[in-house]
Image (spheres, rainbow, N blue to C red):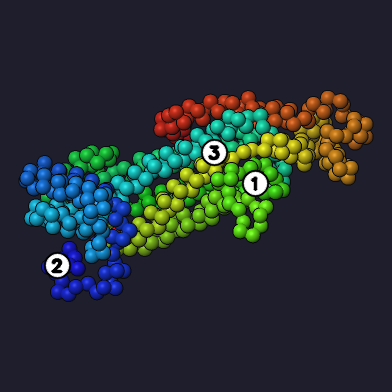
Amino acid sequence: MAGLWGGRFTKETDDEVFAFNESLSFDNRLLNNDIEGSIAHVVMLEKQRIISLEEKDAIVKGLTGIKRDVEAGALDFDGGYEDVHSFVEAKLIERIGDAGKKMHTGRSRNDQVALDMKLYIREQIVILDDLVKDLQETLLKHIEEGLDTYMPGFTHMQKAQPVTVAHHLGAYMEMFIRDRGRLSDIYKRMNFSPLGSGALAGTTYSLDREYVASMLGFEGATRNSMDSVSDRDYLIELLSALSTVMMHLSRFSEEIIIWNSNEYRFVELDDAYSTGSSIMPQKKNPDIAELVRGKTGRVYGALLSILTTMKGIPLAYNKDMQEDKEMTFDAIDTVKDCVKLFTGMLKTIKFNTEVMAASAMKGFTNATDAADYLVKKGVPFRDAHGIIGRLVLYCIDKDKAIEECSIEELQAISDVFDTDVYDAISLKTCVDKRLTKGGPAPERMKECVTFYREYLLNSERLNQMIYKKS
Ligand code: ARG
């Protein structure tokens, strides 16, 4: 197949070389972005009197036709073209003749591909952000319902202090707020048009780069043409942000897997979001959560891959950079699927509130509160810690909870105990009195719910506020 460089060459590309070199098989997903960019480019060329009005009109019509025909399935990405850019140009020339040969005036595939990727990534950031927002909406419902649902909080996987379902899920809400903040930061930072940077050193045509940039919804045009064609920072940033999203989803998945286990039974997964075993009839497996946890690896892989690809590339464009696509696309697809499926799973999950509350009562989660009780009666904290430690040992021996001890048993360990201790160490007191900002007390969590509602109504504005404050 003749390439775009027929003049300089006397031989056809070797078949294996062609197959190794081509990117059409995966960059064809940039078709619409490529066409959008080319239309903006030729509109600008005409405005600058570099091509005629008729030529511009013919090109725009031709490009629109190509887009329409591909969408309708009337035009295939046949294998003979190196990449989406050569495909579109060749089809255009085939369809409209000589005018088509002027489309690439003042442009290189280097600034073209840089533009296409930015256009595509911008769209994807918005889609990803929407999906995470859906997840947050689902989370908020559970938070609102779980304000008074007690559960044990853990450190080292050991029961620590009681919290509520709302408080625990609120932690994930905060993570996803930061995730979305990162996405919007990346969008803002990357939103400058590279078109007009040419191969690396701009061009002698009088292009209006700012005009193209504003037509395509960019903040402006980039400042340095060599940087513009070599910059893949925004992909690295995106993959890093997506890796963090996956890390959060993976931790959440891990908790759901634990909560769904026979030993915990804190949650019940909907039948539609679980799978059975081919051999063990009793099984109801949390496959979705496990797959989300598992797929985290390939998103991290994409990040590491592009970081490694970019580290040794001298300025400006080198073909290595074509490797920015496949794994990035795969990572974006993976994260979209994971967020979507995870949201569905979360929408239909049931919290076994009684099991959770019963579990919060066991395991001495009120030991800190028992010590605090003694402190309030004048015992220094370190001594109180020792007294409650001995009390816990006694309880383990007798196989009972602190609140199940009689006042005589308690007083045998410390005469500071009085009958008001039972109220001081009840589950309700332990949670409701934890009123510090950020604590699990329903009163505090209600304030968070108000904030989350407001945030979801107008996330963009709120994201900006969050960053202004810090
Ligand atoms: N398919 C190429 C890529 O993805 C397009 C740019 C090619 N430029 C070049 N000078 N070979 O990077």
- N-term-proximal mark, 1 vs 3: 1
Q: Earlier in the sequence, mark 1 or mark 2?
A: 2
**Residue at the spot of label 1:** 260
Number of the front mark, 1 or 2 = 1
Bin the neighbour count of mark 3 within 10 Å (Cα to Cα): few under 14, some 14-19, many 20 and up.
Answer: some
**Residue 299 x %, y %:** 46, 54
Q: Are marks 3 and 2 in contact (CB under 8 Å)?
A: no
Disc 1 marks which amino acid?
A: Asn
Disc 2 marks a residue whose amino acid type is: Gly
Q: Is residue 442 at all visible to an observer of this figure?
A: yes
Q: Is residue 434 left or right of residue 464?
A: right
Q: Position of residue 91 (x, y in %)?
A: 17, 56
Residue drawn 33% across the image and 58% down it: 26
What residue type is disc 3 on? Lys
Mark sitting earlier along the chain (3/2)? 2
Residue underneath mark 3: 347
Q: What residue did someone put label 2 on?
A: 6
